[in-house]
Image (cartoon, grey):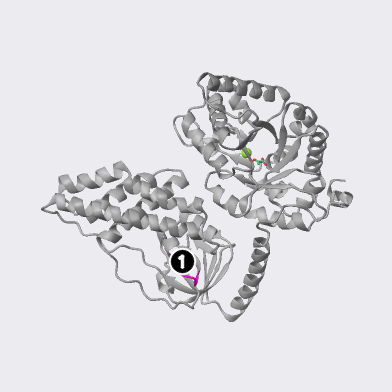
Amino acid sequence: MLELYGRGVSNGIAIGKLSFYSNEKDDIPKYTVKDADAELKLYRQAASQAKQHLQQLYDEACKHVSQNESVIFQTHIMILEDSKFVETVETCIRQMHLNAEFAVRNTAEKIAEIFQALKDDYLRQRASDIMDVANTILEVLMPKKPEKQENDDIPVIIAATELLPSETISFQQKNLIGFVTNKGSKNSHTAILARTMGLPSVIQVKESLLSFDGLDAIIDGQNGRVIISPDHNTLAQYRIRQERYLQRQQKLKNQIGLASVTRNGQKIVLSANIDSLEGIGSAKNNDAEGVGLFRADYIFGKRKTPPPENEQTEVYKTILRAFPDSEVAICLADLSSEKNVPYLDIPKENNPAMGYRGIRVLLNNKEFFMTQLRALLRASVCGNLSIVMPMINNIEEIEYVRRTIEDAKLELRAKGQEYRRNVKLGAMISTPAAALISDEICRVSDFVTIGTNALTQFTLAIDRENQKLEYYYEPYHKAVFRLIELVCRNAHERGKKVTVCGELACDPYITPMFLALGVDRLAVVPSKLLDVKAVVRETDTTDRKTLLKRIQ
Ligand code: PEP
Ligand code: MG
């Protein structure tokens, strides 16, 4: 028995046989061709067949995973047709008389190298998408030898150095139960697809996997463990754990489509808390009722100039269109010195969490702020938008935001651009100060949303990024609960709705307390939505006193 460690990127336990998948393309030959025009024709035919193949993969993916995950294959078609990519390949062939296979592989490698050098993990991963597209074209230009035949009845765990999205989705055989790879990252499309397909997966294993081909193995996706040739005891233990996991998953799956209502009929909206468009798919797969918090900060970071209004508008429209029937709350830019926004003058600080950030930055950068507001308002015609203000501490800040929204509307009207008139404006309650004056905040704000992570940090004076203080970071602290209770009371007395976002909203152990407090909506990370729903449906809130014991 041998244990390997990596990074678990998709939960669950798989027990089966490892099958090593080699995706190394045979060496690509390099030679010059006499008839460049004929070679060009060959390339164009191959690209057109590759496009058809990608379209088929897209249709296939739509049957197995949600449309949002399947979109990767449309992105691949866009890369395939990208003018820079096509021009570079064609120049290689036309001017240098190089063979099509080499031109494709060489061009893809050069573009991939540029992406690989980027700091952003997400963009770095796009390098593998480019190589994947090149492989799809090469597949046509130089078809592969037939795959080894697998026995269809034995559960198979695919092991590979790296898996590309098209490969991941093409392993749709019914006996596929998991993945283990040497490379990849949590944000790679392969990891995302694995999660959506519900296949336990471990990546970043250091040991070469080829020598384990054909051996029995266990994948523990939760703990990032891979056990090769498990002994009898380990196997027995894992079978029990797998059984428990599957029972729990089944119970959670049964929640899909059911209302998030307690035994005694109290409704709570279970919405998603996501911070990129990538989260839409899993939010929908887990039955999210709209989005309780969408943080769009990724649009602003790691770039030299602020994102243009149209680009922002498209992002907001996409998320609103994804949830046409329910509310989508988008948070205003919550930027600070650690967010890498050189176009805003935010000096390096020792303590950015308590520094120049959130609304404080927006107040000082009116044009930047106006751009986001115009983008949000323009997108508002696509759905039911509400806007969340981060790091609010007093009424004047909210009044300033309201005035700026009116300025933005004036500008849109002058240009004849449409927006919805009834966009709600809510304050994020993330400081004890905001919680303590939540009665006043609720007078000027349409709703409140309690950011329990920041509220815990500021109430207990514990920097949540400080590893030494992890032990003291205690979201279950009575002081935090009492502030939450106060906010709920103040809001409800004024007829305003309360959302809870942050980790506590995802904690099924605390769900009954939120129900007893009459919280209207929880903004939960998609993977926890069904866990929370199961608790909601099991809870009876008639005896509020018992449920609120922790607060007294
Ligand atoms: C919070 O503070 O609870 C919150 C939702 O914000 P963040 O994304 O900073 O955790
Ligand atoms: Mg934050």
Of residues 404 and 37, the one drawn nearer to the viewer in this rendering: 37
- In the image, residue 35 sits, relative to residue 235, either above or below, namely above
- Which residue appears at 22% of the width and 46% of the height? 90
- Packing grade of label 1 (10 A; few <14, some 14-19, many >=20) is some
Q: Is residue 173 magenta?
A: yes
Give left or right: position of 339 versus 84. right
- Identify the residue at the far bottom of this view: 232
Occupied quadrant, residue 234: bottom right
Place of residue 168 in the rendered image (x, y in percent of width and height, measured from the top left): 44, 61
Q: Is residue 289 left or right of residue 478?
A: left
Task: Identify the residue under disc 1.
Answer: 172
Q: Locate residue 232, reporting x and y percent.
A: 59, 81
Q: Residue at position x 36%, y 74% from top? A: 148
Point out the residue furthest to the left here: 34
Q: Quadrant of residue 447?
A: top right
88 vs 495, nearest the viewer? 495
Percent x, y for residue 392? 69, 30
In what element is the residue under mark 1?
A: loop
**Can the viewer see residue 214 in this picture?**
yes
Give, as a single range, the part of the protein colored magenta.
Answer: 171-176
